[in-house]
């Protein structure tokens, strides 16, 4: 085997290279073990790397192309999250430039903040230090965070409505930012004055509060109260992301409660769109985003309406509101206890009816018509319900709105007046690896 050229070995090893869990499971039910490798005994590149040093050197870049980082956190306010050992390992082994995707799984919940029904806080200077450390070393095509809703909100420096959180009992959400290609040059972090922020790490919490209090304030339009400007979240602008994915998991537990339709889930959706009270009144989604992927299992239609009424200016919208093919939620007796399945489907159908209304006749009647008119592709992750999808397509046809054409089951595209397909890049969704697509060269 020592005489086999490295090129031949790499070609052989390529057949053992399979998509990473984070490439294919981001639309599944979020959980702590969502991204665990489920077939550890199958032939893999990791096994190959243990054969000899020469083979290890060949497959090492592929092994660390998709990073899954589970940091140990004991406090958010004291900020015990430290990426430096991981980054040093990547740099020492010259693996930093080969990182294609980076996924951070955080299982920490601030119990004190949770008990007080408030969103935990992370100092802005700590977050800017974290993003600067990560993106000064790696240049990923996708960056993903899997975390409890309250922890995810803290990482975004935003507030979360928690009064009804107990009735939803959603353990994890997924937020992912992606792009399909890198620029000709390695992108640099777009946040400025990084050195000044790093020196601020030595400030005490009291000094940092005084610093933030001295920042310019903005006046509330209705109350007249002056607010400090919402803290920026450099994660959204540190790279020219073109696609965003928000997976809010299952809302089925809320259907066990009285008047469930009046509940409000703990969600980052309003903060992303900038349609809530301060500090969630400034949208986090940057203008570079042209693709929005929203996944939630049986969300309340009133909550889904937030996305419909405040749709950002995008070219592609993906929506999934029911369990996928591998999700056995509806067959789980414990999960479905005290739940009327008819309520689940009623809310799902109401949500899709509202979506089709906005997609067609409603767009010309609402204030966000300009954004809906920019939409070129709509994709449903629920097309396996063929009857419901056929009804949606028929609704579009009967609406009298010209342009929308069913490209294939689950996908509607908008053609121009001459019948030409949109010029939208079909590869703008960088979150889900296409079936049969190679995971990348060694």
Image: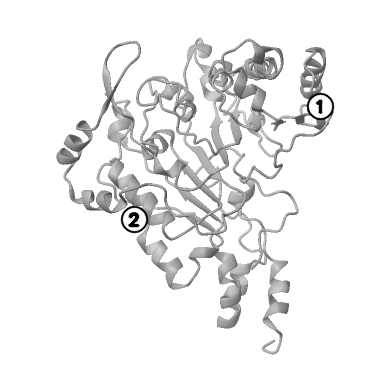
Q: Check the image and report above or below for 275 versus 7.
A: above
Residue 126 is situated, as x and y percent measured from the top left of the image, at 30, 46
In this view, the residue in front, 70 or 427, is 427
Residue furthest right as drawn: 419
Q: Check the image and report above or below for 134 versus 116.
A: below
Residue that appears at 54% across and 39% down: 288
Mark 2 neighbour class, 10 Å CA radius: few under 14, some 14 to 19, many 20 or more: few
In this view, the residue in front, 15 or 111, is 15
Which circle's residue, 1 or 2, is located before the other in the chain? 2
Q: Check the image and report above or below for 137 versus 7.
A: above
Tell me the residue that label 1 is attached to: 405
Residue 98 in sight: yes
Q: Check the image and report above or below for 11 versus 160.
A: below
Residue 285 is situated, as x and y percent measured from the top left of the image, at 49, 34
Question: Mark 1 and 2 residues: CB-CB less than 8 Å, in contact?
Answer: no
Snapshot quadrant of residue 366: top right
Q: How many numbered circles are shown? A: 2
Tell me the residue that label 2 is attached to: 82
Identify the disc placed on residue 284. Answer: none
- Image quadrant for the C terminus? bottom right
Residue furthest front as drawn: 418
- Residue 336 placement, left or right of 413: left
Mark 1 neighbour class, 10 Å CA radius: few under 14, some 14 to 19, many 20 or more: some
In this view, the residue in front, 164 or 97, is 97
- Residue 199 placement, left or right of 324: left
Snapshot quadrant of residue 217: top left
Q: CA distance from mark 1 to mark 2?
A: 49 Å
Residue 320 is situated, as x and y percent measured from the top left of the image, at 65, 30
Residue that appears at 56% across and 14% down: 367
Residue 75 in sight: no
- Residue 36 placement, left or right of 9: left
């Amino acid at each position: 085997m020592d005489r086999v050229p490295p090129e031949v070995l790499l070609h052989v090893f390529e057949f053992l290279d399979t998509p990473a869990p984070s490439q294919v499971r981001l639309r599944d039910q979020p959980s702590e073990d969502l991204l665990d490798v489920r077939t550890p005994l199958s032939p893999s590149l990791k096994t190959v790397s243990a054969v000899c040093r020469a083979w290890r050197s060949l497959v090492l870049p592929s092994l660390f192309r998709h990073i899954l980082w589970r940091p140990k956190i004991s406090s958010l306010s004291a900020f015990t999250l430290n990426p430096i050992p991981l980054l040093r390992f990547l740099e020492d082994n010259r693996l930093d430039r080969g990182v294609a995707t980076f996924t951070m799984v955080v299982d920490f919940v601030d119990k004190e903040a949770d008990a007080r029904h408030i969103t935990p806080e992370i100092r802005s200077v700590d977050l800017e230090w974290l993003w600067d450390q990560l993106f000064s070393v790696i240049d990923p095509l996708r960056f993903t965070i899997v975390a409890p809703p309250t922890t995810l909100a803290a990482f975004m420096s935003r507030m979360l409505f928690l009064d009804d959180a107990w009735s939803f009992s959603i353990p994890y959400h997924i937020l992912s930012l992606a792009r399909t290609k890198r620029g000709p040059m390695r992108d640099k972090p777009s946040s400025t004055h990084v050195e000044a922020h790093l020196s601020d790490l030595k400030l005490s919490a009291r000094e940092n509060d005084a610093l933030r209090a001295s920042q310019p304030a903005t006046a509330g339009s209705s109350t007249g109260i002056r607010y400090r400007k919402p803290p920026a979240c450099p994660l959204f602008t540190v790279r020219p992301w073109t696609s965003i994915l928000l997976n809010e998991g299952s809302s089925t537990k809320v259907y066990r409660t009285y008047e469930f339709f009046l509940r409000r889930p703990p969600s980052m959706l309003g903060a992303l769109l900038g349609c809530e009270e301060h500090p969630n009144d400034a949208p986090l989604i940057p203008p570079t985003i042209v693709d929005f992927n929203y996944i939630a299992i049986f969300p309340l239609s009133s909550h889904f309406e937030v996305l419909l009424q405040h749709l950002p200016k995008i070219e592609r919208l993906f929506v999934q509101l029911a369990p996928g093919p591998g999700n056995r939620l509806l067959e789980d007796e414990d999960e479905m206890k005290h739940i009327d399945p008819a309520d689940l489907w009623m809310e799902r159908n109401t949500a899709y009816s509202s979506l089709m209304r906005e997609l067609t006749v409603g767009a010309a009647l609402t204030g966000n018509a300009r954004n809906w008119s920019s939409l070129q592709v709509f994709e449903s992750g629920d097309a396996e319900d063929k009857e419901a999808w056929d009804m949606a397509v028929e609704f579009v046809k009967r609406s009298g709105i010209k342009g929308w054409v069913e490209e294939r089951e689950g996908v509607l595209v908008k053609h121009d007046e001459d019948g030409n397909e949109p010029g939208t890049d079909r590869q703008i969704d960088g979150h889900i690896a296409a079936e049969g697509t190679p995971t990348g060269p060694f």
